[in-house]
Image: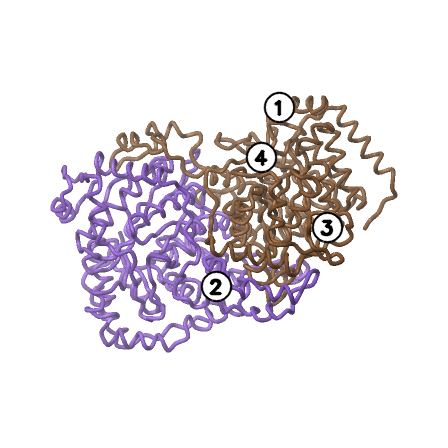
Chain colours: A purple, B brown
Amino acid sequence: MDESGQGQAVAGRRRERGGRGAAREGRGRGQGLGRPFIRRNIPPYDILSEENLLKIESAADRILAEIGIEFRDDPAALDLWRRAGAKLDGVRVRFEPGMLREVLKTAPARFTQHARNPARSVEIGGDAVVFSPAYGSPFVMDLDKGRRYGTLEDFQNFIRLAQSSPWLHHSGGTICEPVDVPVNKRHLDMVYSHIRYSDRAFMGSVTAEGRAEDSVAMARILFGDDFTDQNCVILGNVNVNSPLVWDGTMTKALRAYARANQAGVVVPFILGGAMGPVTNAGAIAQSLAETMAGCALTQLERPGAPVIFGNFLSSMAMRSGSPTFGTPEPAIGSMVIGQLARRLNLPLRCSGNFTTSKLPDAQAMTEGTMSMLAAIHCGANFILHSAGFLDGLLSMSYEKFVLDTDLCGALHTYCDGVQVDDDQLALDAFREVGPGGHFFGCAHTMGHYQTAFWDSELADNDPFEKWEAGGSVDAAQRANRLWKKRLADYEPPALDEGVDEALRDFVARRKGEAPDAWY
Amino acid sequence: MDESGQGQAVAGRRRERGGRGAAREGRGRGQGLGRPFIRRNIPPYDILSEENLLKIESAADRILAEIGIEFRDDPAALDLWRRAGAKLDGVRVRFEPGMLREVLKTAPARFTQHARNPARSVEIGGDAVVFSPAYGSPFVMDLDKGRRYGTLEDFQNFIRLAQSSPWLHHSGGTICEPVDVPVNKRHLDMVYSHIRYSDRAFMGSVTAEGRAEDSVAMARILFGDDFTDQNCVILGNVNVNSPLVWDGTMTKALRAYARANQAGVVVPFILGGAMGPVTNAGAIAQSLAETMAGCALTQLERPGAPVIFGNFLSSMAMRSGSPTFGTPEPAIGSMVIGQLARRLNLPLRCSGNFTTSKLPDAQAMTEGTMSMLAAIHCGANFILHSAGFLDGLLSMSYEKFVLDTDLCGALHTYCDGVQVDDDQLALDAFREVGPGGHFFGCAHTMGHYQTAFWDSELADNDPFEKWEAGGSVDAAQRANRLWKKRLADYEPPALDEGVDEALRDFVARRKGEAPDAWY
């Protein structure tokens, strides 16, 4: 780490994490508050037998060997495959069974993504779980103004809301599209905003090779060249053009991150019935094939570069052709994907909080909770889309964002599992209280008063009469009040002035080098 | 089965299950519709190690041996314990480690609860999952009329709504308290209503020994004496007066069901910090001790009688003392309880759909979905409270009921897990579609069109513009429309006139034997 990065890190360490908002969110609950990431104390939920896992792996191997994957518009990627021994037929690449697994052996099973505040660096892999905001919506929503295109102000607001929550661990990437900024310059404002308004780890752009390189360059300004070359300081999330196509835009961005020793998140987005079969087993086999190919490409570009095995299964309303989210098939599919990723010994990105609802209502949280719990159960290490989505991924909702971060808080406690020791077993309390007594004031209860039980800031647990007297406010309205309070209370984390100036110079220079482009 | 029961069964078999409402709910989706119960294709989620399970079992054994449990106001129960070799000190009963496990060996690991429509009989135990409505609320709610005390009309409406849903499997018990009927006669109207308005299995009363016996007597009229003596045809749900007290009212009712070879559901309701310790491990150990004692009592009353190992862990908002529901600790605790029940080889009742929200809003379904998924993951066989609760168990909501049955539908698909075979792996589809194609019209998609993907009747998956053009209706309002439509479309299942008359006579006679009592 060079001096500016180091100085920044020290400045970050001195500050109370998350500002006043974070302290308030954790009020009355020491447990979990401010953990840089979750270290899970519950195992993944393995739902499929060894025999069936082997069948899926074998199907993926056959897809790769018999049908192959097209790598379009990226001759350098084809060269890498040729030299690695794959069979090329134009842009179609076929892989002998076992070849990709061999290539993937150089990829780390876990790594650290560094934050400018070292106390907030995250582990990705193993028993670590990292919650990151949702990514990629063109629209934003709130209960006051409804749905409209996202702006840079919205983008920065969501960074502020994320930074204010102790239940997220990562600042994310394209939280919403800042549609008021030219397409070819958005990435500069987005990366700068993450660095300026958050002290957590973040993601860069992937929409063009040059934008990926700009993102990495800005990370270098923050962390220094040497540190960046030896450590992961930025992620890039790339999508397969399913079925079985990798577009050059994506592979060039993916290779740019790998070349800089930064982590790609390799994600097939498979909408069953459109980009993949309607049956889960087939979609999972396809996802495995596509992800293995993408992850392996990073290892050919730079052996040992960190990479995340990603996945995004989705379903469809067969009568209308509309995509559906938060449904049971992708939730269950995620669990299988998790088993497959662990067999490859790669960090896993899975699922997130998805819904097609257009409001932060009962549907939104039924679907959101089912899909978010699937992300936990499948053993995902990096959970993109942990907070904010409504409207089938098309909108970031201010209210949903804080509802979801509250759920993320509950999931900290969930992942703590059950502690079993003499204190937790509380035999002395039973002796003290005895049959027919109560535990309200016993020594054991008093001793655990501060940390007992998840304490939601958004749930209303009051008796009906008290809730009614308070105006019969529903959860969406409480969320509306909460995000406004969070933004009003937000304080930006300190940023070294020299770093800030260097970043601003870089952004201004790059913006000046090309005319605005809006597509 | 006597003739009236047999005749009824045949009449039930002839009818389309669930009437028109059920057919409509399953529209576009053959899969799962009308299954009498779920046979799970996913394993339970075991979260705790053998070592920690042993520690909890050992703590339960110490509670039972060192502190013991009080059996109040039931000398016959004390006699049973004395003869079984327990140590009595007044009403305090202590058990040597291993004693209760030995007694429990006569309890069946699984059994069938017969419905008057044999096609709707349910298995309880093993890999079977049965969804039953919520139980016990004094209040009901809907969006039009708000909260008020429940009436017999409400009670019957909820039976009709349950019967109309293909995603429930059981008619339940005290779905809401019919507060307009005298306390000492309610059970007669409730049991009659279950038999009259549903053809599914149901539960009887437990609030007094005589009411339990009346409930069993009515089941005998329906199923015949001999059949009832040899088969389970009614359940009774009894609660421990935690901590460590069994009240005579409950043990007498429990013994009445066991005596008649009917199944008790033995449930400690432990609100952590009040009726048990605030730490999960201690509450689980307590729950295990209390449930083992209750289940064992049934085996002393009648060895081999069916019994269900129940559990209801709950948490508390420590600042206000309000109970909280749908929180992570009970969800996680359920998984451990499930592991313990399986080690006892007993059918399991766990968790359900709980929330403190006073509206069918985002909070309601965040909490409800988390707790309902816990019931699935823990391996519960009989899931009481699958639909309807709001308001911290105090209110049955008409809207929440249909939102919850929709979730129950999704959980049918969830429990189906992932099928892995050549058809599901769809290699031919990949060959047909190839890289960059789409699966919309391929043969594989067409072949699975009817059954692919869970198809919620309440979720709105439309694009934003279409949803907005349709009036921007939220999930709660859609649920409001749906329950009204279900009630309007409801058709009662046929009931043999002789049986009906005999039941009415019984109810009239019993009502005439005592003055009304309102407490």
Task: Return the x and y of residue A159 as percentages of the image width and height.
Answer: 38, 64
Check contact, mark 3 vs mark 1: CB within 8 A. no
Q: Quadrant of the N terminus of chain B?
A: top right
Compared to residue A389, the image places residue A158 above or below, namely below
Q: Chain of mark 1?
A: B
Q: Nearer the viewer, mark 1 or mark 2?
A: 1
Taking depth in this image into account, of B342 and A8 the one nearest to the observer is B342
The amino acid on which the numbered mark 2 sits, given as a three-letter code, is Trp
Q: Nearer the viewer, mark 1 or mark 4?
A: 4
- Residue B123's disc number: 4
For residue B475, say whether it is visible: no
Which residue is disc 2 drawn over? A483
Label 2's element? helix
Work out how far the residue at label 1 is from the one at label 4, CA to CA, in angstroms. 18 Å
Left or right of A426? Residue A343 is left
Q: Nearer the viewer, mark 3 or mark 1?
A: 3
- Residue B268's disc number: none
Work out how far the residue at label 1 is from the one at label 2, CA to CA, in angstroms. 55 Å
Q: Chain of mark 3?
A: B
Q: Chain of mark 2?
A: A
Work out how far the residue at label 3 is from the one at label 2, CA to CA, in angstroms. 62 Å
Check contact, mark 2 vs mark 4: CB within 8 A. no
Label 3's element? helix
Q: For the residues tagged 3 and 1, is the chain the same?
A: yes
Q: Residue at x 50, y 56 (%)?
A: A143
Which residue is disc 1 drawn over? B13
- Residue B82's disc number: 3
The amino acid on which the numbered mark 1 sits, given as a three-letter code, is Arg
The amino acid on which the numbered mark 3 sits, given as a three-letter code, is Arg
Task: Return the x and y of residue B471 as percentages of the image width and height.
Answer: 52, 44
The amino acid on which the numbered mark 4 sits, given as a three-letter code, is Glu
